[in-house]
Amino acid sequence: MAIGIDKLSFYTSEYVLDLVELAQRRGVDPNKYTIGIGQDKQSVIPNYEDVVTMGANAAAKIIDNDDRQQIDLIIFATESGIDNSKSSALYVQKLLNLSEFSRTIEIKQACYAGTFGLMQARDYVASHSGKRVLVIASDIARYGLNTPGEVTQGGGAVAMIVSESPHIATINSDSVYMSRDVADFWRPIDRTEAIVDGHLSTDIYKEMFLTLWQRYKDQSGRTIADFAGFTFHLPYTKMGKKAFDQIIDEADERTQGRLLKNLKASQKFSREVGNLYTGSVYLSLLSLLSYAQDLVAGEQLAIFSYGSGAEAELYSITLQENFFKYVPANETKNELADRKKVSVDQYEQIFNSQLLDSHENVSSDHLDADHFQFLGWQNGERQYKVDCKN
């Protein structure tokens, strides 16, 4: 039975920061940002957005009445959770008018959780014929103002519907995975910004990719020549390139040229958005499907998912007939192009205005009729605008 990604969508905030301007304000050579780590812009998340609204806004683009009849599992992957008890999937269920006869689960393991959610969705559909699963990977990357990690901030959400006979890609049963307790990145409960050892994180990322790639080849018998492209978790785009450079010499010159071209295609959206943790690798996939010009049905793509702390998985997908008709390429490009540019001063004000204290009855002064919004707190309960035109 063919099971995989039937629908795919992306959402991010309406505000964007130019990283050249941020570099100039911080007294840094802009090339350090645009070339050294491979980032041009980053989404700026206002206080009327959170992981729930971004996830719901992404999913609203692909949910239809048939989906509402068939979806009975909602998996929400995030490391930017808004409650230590209640699942973000419950809020999404209500906002999207999905059936109450559903399971609603939130999962966490740094940036890797979206992949685990996708695998659980595939296995669920395999044992529940005719059902569909909504998987959402939504996050806000925060490291603090004027910190080493500031340039790798960002945010957004990727939503996917997993089903039988998918329109975009089947998820192949060839995963290899590993995990190890590593102190490269974590965020204690009492902190709003992460603690990160950037150099260690890069080293572990590269090591795990190389280890899993060798294990994948040993178990599957496949080689680099069997793939039309690779997609990576991209906290910054240069990180994926560093990992891929470790194996590129395994390909002949012609294959190298194609894979490197498609690697650049997979980085384009991330260069414009920044880090979105659990959704990053699937934004990379969306970017590859949106910009690559030589992909055809039946070809396979390799996906490397990594979450600090650390856990990683490598697997493949197979592109389906006419897959490109179901990829929201132009919609995503237009959404990013239409964002409102903010100055560094505006970005700093937005960063410091997050509504994080549930003891205060506060609300956002922004109202957008077209999207779900976080309105603020009332007696410790999060309030959302539900009358969305999406």
Image (cartoon, rainbow, N blue to C red):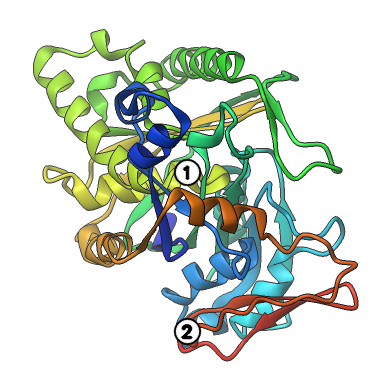
Side of 225 relative to 131 (left or right): left
The picture places residue 340, in percent across and down from the top left corner, at 36, 64
The x and y percentages for residue 162 are 49, 61
377 lies left or right of 167: right
Q: Is residue 53 above or below residue 136?
A: below
Closer to viewer: mark 2 or mark 1: 1
Q: Front-most of 73 and 198?
A: 198
Residue position for label 1: 280
Q: Tell me which amino acid carries mark 2.
A: Asp
Q: Residues within 10 Å of mark 2 (few under 14, many from 20)?
A: few
Residue placed under numbered mark 2 in the picture: 66
State the mark number for residue 71.
none
Q: Percent x, y for residue 259?
A: 21, 27
Residue drawn at x 52%, y 41% is 153
Residue at image x 62%, y 50%?
A: 120
Return the x and y of residue 256 as percentages of the image width and height.
17, 19
Q: Quadrant of residue 37?
A: top left
